[in-house]
Image (cartoon, rainbow, N blue to C red):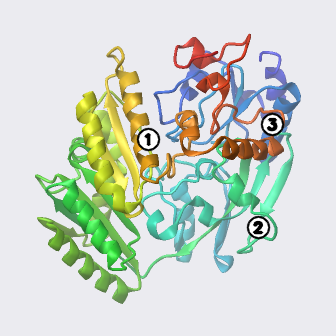
Amino acid sequence: MSALVPRLKGICGDDGVITDRARRRTYESDGLTYHAEVPGVVVLPTTAEQVAEVLGLCSAEGVPFVPRGAGTGLSAGALPRTDGVLVTTSRMRRVVEVDPDNECAVVQPGVANLDITRAAAPYGYYYAPDPSSQQVCSVGGNIAENSGGAHCLKYGFTVNHVLGLQIATPQGELVRLGGKAPEAPGYDLIGAFIGSEGTLGIATEATVRLVRTPQKVTTLLAAFTGMDAGGEAVSSVVAEGVLPAAVEMMDALSIAAAEAAVACDYPEGAGAVLIVELDGPAADVDADAAMVRRLCERAGAFEIREASGAAERARIWKGRKSAFAAVGRISPAYIVQDGVVPRTALGEVLGDIARLSAESGIRVANVFHAGDGNLHPLVLFDDAEPGAGERAAEVSGAILDLCIRHGGSITGEHGVGVDKACSMPRMFTPEDLETMDLFRRAFDPAGVANPEKLLPTPRLCGEVPGVRKDVHPLVAQGRAEQF
């Protein structure tokens, strides 16, 4: 690795290469701190050409690289390697163009999600995908993980809002996919690249779709004594044909955490709160809001609030948007999961999660996109307690098994990364996984692009015994077994 450093500095400059161990430790994990490893070297390119040159050098030398955006990911997708190069796009933060005539914007990968909306707002537009970390998470990371957010019920995920990409391939070529046109001919390579978690290359520029600012937005907060009643309200809203922009739910434990962290002032005594946001033409929003009120009352809501303006709407959302970080107030450590179940199975799965929690003694706080069944259980543990992390990981894996058993998925928007790679065979057949691997190797035959992420590997999952002389860093730490 040391022999590579001068050449990397020749590409990115002295200030664009980090070799000091203390500074490299800053990048040892993404938002899922349960997995951590100090990178061999960190590079901070500022142009697409620099990214491509770095990848070309890694490919030529057989050195693995790991892409990283803002580091807010929650699946260890940006977990570095001690023997690799961490390519961080955080300095590529330019909004290249806002084009209201074509309802799109062109941005570099380090641009924060919310900054697209800020740039488009003067033209009467905004960027719809809104992960909870949207103030800091970057577009490049959103593309890698196919991030969604609270409003994905109505507006979909990142893949539904990207028209074009410039990517740096693992071989160091710059390639353009799509553009400003609504549809690109040929194979959907954009769709394949989005959500590939850095295993097919790195996005160096994106052309994203902009959405007109709605005429009216109404946000309701409904408080219930328990999750069952809140779930009944969600089912009723969907059954009536109302399509809210967002339907979010939090349980008592996550509410308590949010109150302690940001004083969101949710109704006292709530065992569950439901946040329902409606947007569109004013007449439609008013009619749908009245319907949602009636259905929540029928389901047993003991208090319903309607935001009177933007400030109050932001306050309602503050508790939900802060939920993940807020759990740090009530637990030294936690694992965020991201399973998906059919809406009809929500009640049963939440009951099963409660039983898992009680049987294991591991607390679980539930925050989720109720409208589309995307669960975000927060599995709490004390990392200073011997064996607590392992028990939490077991509960976390058992929750994914529940999702699969009910016809769901192991991830909705956080990606697979390292955290869930070994769960992939529970959801996909060997033939499925082989097909995915063939596609991956069509882009990256040398296997240097974010290796050991997304797909299960023998070294991390112990699927195929074999003799290996190298020792993976996770094995050295006792976090994985090598056969």
Taking the image as shown, residue 362 lies to the left or right of residue 436, namely: left
Counting residues from the start of the chain, the first of labels 2 and 3 encountered is: 3
SS for dot 2: loop
Q: Residue beneath label 3, please?
A: 55
Counting residues from the start of the chain, the first of labels 3 and 1 encountered is: 3
In this view of the protein, which residue sits in the foreground, 366 or 90?
366
Give residue 188's position: percent from left, percent from top: 74, 63
Asked if the residue under mark 3 is in contact with the one under mark 2, i.e. CB atoms within 8 Å, the reply is no
Amino acid, disc 1: Asp
Residue 318 visible within the image: no
Amino acid, disc 2: Gly
Counting residues from the start of the chain, the first of labels 2 and 1 encountered is: 2
Q: Establish if 23 lies above or below 344.
A: above
Q: Establish if 114 lies above or below 42.
A: below
**Label 3 environment density (alpha carbons within 10 Å; few <14, some 14–19, many ≥20):** many
Quarter of the image that includes the C terminus: top right
Taking the image as shown, residue 125 lies to the left or right of residue 382, namely: right
Q: Please tell me in which quadrant of the rendered image residue 442 appears.
A: top right
User: Mark number for residue 179?
Assistant: 2
Q: Nearer the viewer, mark 2 or mark 1?
A: 1
